[in-house]
Image (spheres, rainbow, N blue to C red):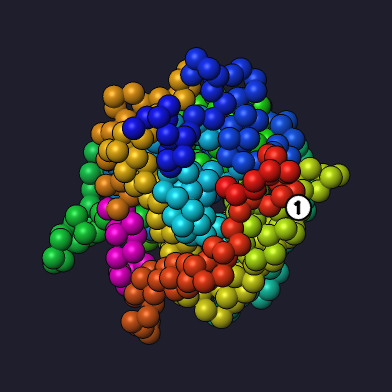
Amino acid sequence: MTGAESDSAPGSVRPGAGADGAPDGGSHDDGALAELGYKPELKRTLGNFHTFAAGISYISILTGTFQLFYFGVSHGGPAYWWSWPMVFAGQLMVALCFCELAARYPVAGSIYNWAKQLGGPHVGWLGGWMMLTASMVSLAAVALAYQVTLPQISSWFQFIGNGTGQTDAAANAVLLGAALIAFTTLINAFGVKLMARINSAGVAIELIAAVVLILLLAAHITRGPAAVTQTFGLGRGESLGYFGAFLTASLASAYVMYGFDTASSLGEESKDPARNAPRAILRALVASFVIGGLILLFALLAVPDLHSRQLSVDGLQYVVLSTLGSTVGQLVLWCVVIAITVCELAVHTAGIRLAFAMARDNNLPASSLLARVSPRFQTPVLPAIVIGLVGVGILLINVNQPQIFSVITSIAIIMIYLAYLLVTLPMLVQRLRGRWTPVPGRFSLGRFGLPVNVVAVLWGLGMSVNLAWPRAAVYNATGPQHWYLRWGAFLFIGVVALGGFAYYWCVQRHRTGVLAAHAADAGGDTAP
């Protein structure tokens, strides 16, 4: 069954298409909203670079590599580098599926709306709920990266204690993180234009700094490429050998390469998003892969001592300072601080658009308030404040229970992978039923759509299992050992998913429907 035969089936609508099936020029974007039941409320001000910057700042190569390089090396040795192209290949399949969806549904809260259109309202709500919960935890997790970098630039940034006390680092991380979240809350509350300007400027600095870092590390190479085949004997004596160690180390790459869907989540505020969003998604992912891969490779080839214990403790910060010297190294670390800031801004922005999209469908408590768009700033202000407060609240867990926080952080990333799966799996079902029809003239995978979609689903399932596997190294790295920490992924996700869905099933689903104030035709039927 094609879209021409049934416009009511999930995945069968062709929004904004004219009588000949071609996109209806400039009216396609708002026409797509009307087909989904919404009226345009957010101001379209974002251009090509803005949407690209939104995707690449969420991935934030400098933030992710500087925060997680130590983990990859400590668990997989230099050979962990090969997990970078592996994760890229899997995420590319997911991104290609998202590109078709971004061309067809250029709408805020992309993951939620895509899952709803493909799998129905229940799947959509669950995907949105998982992504929203994960976004709020990620907001807190990214904020902690300040503590990894700022005190290495200057001890002045260690406001609480001197860093040697048992809780000095954790408490100081909360203070620095709370200040960062307060900043992103204010910027997002003042409108998308200000956010986009700061984000784009930050991304430009990050990209320039990353290229300069690659060149500087390349100029200090002391060993050949064979270094990335060294495993340091890790995994010896384990049931899976080095393969098991490699799967653990691959989490350092999996924790970085996601969030590219943010480029499409700003679809209602972008110019010609049906064309620009797919390009932005692919450009953000490919640029992150190339730049991040070269940074990691040259860092392993340039570090003075590949066997240094500091390599698996301080990670890239140690490589930069020991290889490039303190002056250049500190300049690079300041660029990392900028990257962390714009990454936090992008995570917050994506969470706001997702909350707005769900509230507009009356799918959250106090939906009418959360979906209200400020007439002055033309952005949803209340979701910015609520998400910011929740992020600070989650940060406070880190003060005395850092292990629990690391568990929750890891689980948040699993939930994002699961939310992606709640899009790619229903999309595959629609393809197999013959109900998926890309918009003519827009991004399309053509005959490669089915195999790409199959690989995207298999990748999502496999990586979700790998991420959730009850490893002590991830979920209970230091003693004492607790079973509830080891199995934290299954317990936490079970509570969030089952508890949240039980609330939706018993309460919210009876109220769901596009709020009259946001409906394309306020005088007509407002059901989604």
Q: In this view, does 433 lie above or below 306?
A: above
Q: How crowded is mark 1: few (under 14 residues within 10 Å), some or many (20 or more)?
A: many
Observer-nearest of 452 and 370: 370
Amino acid under disc 1: Arg
Q: Can residue 452 be seen in this view?
A: no
The residue shown at (57%, 47%) is: 528
Q: Give the range drawn in magenta.
A: 462-476
Q: In this view, does 92 lie above or below 409?
A: above
Q: In this view, does 200 lie above or below 306?
A: above
Q: How many labels does the image show?
A: 1
Residue 473 falls within the magenta-colored stretch: yes
Q: Position of residue 234 (x, y in %)?
A: 22, 60
Residue 240 falls within the magenta-colored stretch: no
Q: Can residue 126 be seen in this view?
A: yes
Question: Is 170 on the left or on the right of 234, as rendered?
Answer: right
The residue shown at (19%, 55%) is: 243
The residue shown at (48%, 19%) is: 21
Q: Where is residue 480 in the image (x, y as percent from the top left)?
A: 38, 84
* Residue on which disc 1 sits: 372
Q: Is residue 289 above or below residue 469?
A: above
Determine whether the residue tagged by mark 1 lies in a helix, strand or loop.
loop
Q: Position of residue 185 (x, y in %)?
A: 73, 55
The answer to which quarter of the image holds residue 238 is: bottom left
